[in-house]
Image: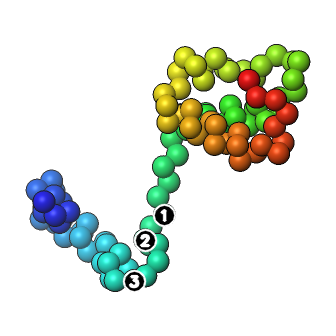
Amino acid sequence: MKWEDFVEDQFNATETNRILASVNWDAWIYQPGLPPVTQNFATESSNFANLLANEYVQWVPGKSSPKDYQNFTTEFYSNLKVVFLENLVYNEGTTKEIL
């Protein structure tokens, strides 16, 4: 099924025409480079994983662990752990000690 068919199946004719007319087909299909729209895949959970990683970067060993540190093992699914660990690796020059 093509995307246009999906839009036609999901919306009335007026809305379908508005949606299809809003796409710059030339830029998406024929122009070189990245797509004309930048996607943001950040979520509340990924933002929290980055925040927790940043707290570890700022953490002073010997003090108590950052707030909500236990969420890494109890709440984070594998992709959130990757977000957390990538942030630590990116900031490895400033990280003193990890977990």
Quadrant assignment for the C terminus: top right
Q: Amino acid at mark 2?
A: Pro
Residue 38 badge: 1
> Is residue 34 placed above or below 76 in the rendered structure?
below
Examine the image and state in which quarter residue 35 appears. Answer: bottom left
Q: Amino acid at mark 1?
A: Thr
**At x 64% / y 37%, what residue is drawn?**
85
Examine the image and state in which quarter residue 7 appears. Answer: bottom left
Residue 43 point in image, percent of width and height: 51, 41
Residue 13 point in image, percent of width and height: 12, 65
> Is residue 39 placed above or below 65 in the rendered structure?
below
Residue identified by numbered label 3: 31
- Mark 2 and mark 3 residues within 8 Å of each other at the beta carbon: no
On screen, residue 34 versus residue 13, left or right, reads: right
Residue 51 point in image, percent of width and height: 68, 35
On screen, residue 41 versus residue 53, left or right, reads: left
Of 93 and 54, nearer the camera is 93
Examine the image and state in which quarter residue 87 appears. Answer: top right
For label 1, the crowd category at 10 Å Cα-Cα, with few meaning under 14, some 14 to 19 and many 20 or more, is: few
> Is residue 25 placed above or below 58 in the rendered structure?
below
Residue identified by numbered label 2: 35
Of the two numbered discs 3 and 1 on the same chain, state the one appearing first in sequence.
Answer: 3
**Viewer-side label of 3, 1:** 3
On screen, residue 92 versus residue 74, left or right, reads: right
Q: Is residue 49 visible?
A: yes
**At x 69% / y 34%, what residue is drawn?**
53
Label 1 – label 2 distance at C-alpha:
7 Å
For label 2, the crowd category at 10 Å Cα-Cα, with few meaning under 14, some 14 to 19 and many 20 or more, is: few
Label 2 – label 3 distance at C-alpha:
9 Å
Residue 83 badge: none
Q: Amino acid at mark 3?
A: Gln
On screen, residue 15 versus residue 64, left or right, reads: left
